[in-house]
Amino acid sequence: MKETEQYQALPAKVSQQVLRGLDRNWKSFFAASSEFKSHPDQFLVKPKIPGYKEPKKGRNLLVYTIQAISKVGLRQGLVKL
């Protein structure tokens, strides 16, 4: 993933947040899957792998930390907190 052009275009802090989100989603999936094997009666359906959206149609969540937002963009009204 780190070699893709889209990933490299992101500021470093934002790309780190993307990787943290992926890590959290996959860990949650594996934990839910093992819990499902132990106690399937506690679930309505079997856990599904984290979903990915089609790049041209989907929306993606990007977490911009305060350090990754430019002050110029804030002053110009490009970014709203």
Image: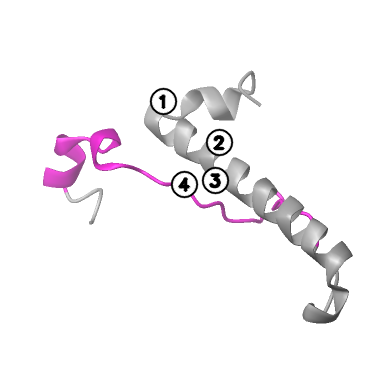
Residue 74, by quadrant, is: top left
What percent of the width, then of the height, locates residue 76?
A: 15, 45
Q: Name the disc covering residue 62, or none.
A: 4
Q: Residue at horizontal 23%, vertical 56%? A: 80
The residue indicated by pointer 3 is 21
Which amino acid, mark 1?
A: Ala
Label 4 sits on what residue type?
Leu
Residue 25 in sight in this render? yes
- For the record, the magenta segment spans 48-76
- Image: 32 above or below 16: below
Element carrying mark 3: helix
Which residue is disc 2 drawn over? 19
- Mark 2 → mark 1, Cα distance in angstroms: 11 Å
Measured Cα–Cα span from mark 4 to mark 3: 9 Å
Q: Is residue 62 magenta?
A: yes
Classified by dominant secondary structure, the portion drawn in magenta counts as loop
Circles 2 and 4, Cβ within 8 Å, touching? The answer is no
Left or right side of 58 for 44: right
Lower position in the chain sequence, tag 4 or tag 1: 1
Answer whether labels 3 and 2 touch (C-beta < 8 Å): yes
If you read the primary sequence from the N terminus, does the residue marked by circle 2 or circle 1 appear first?
1
Under mark 2, the amino acid is: Leu
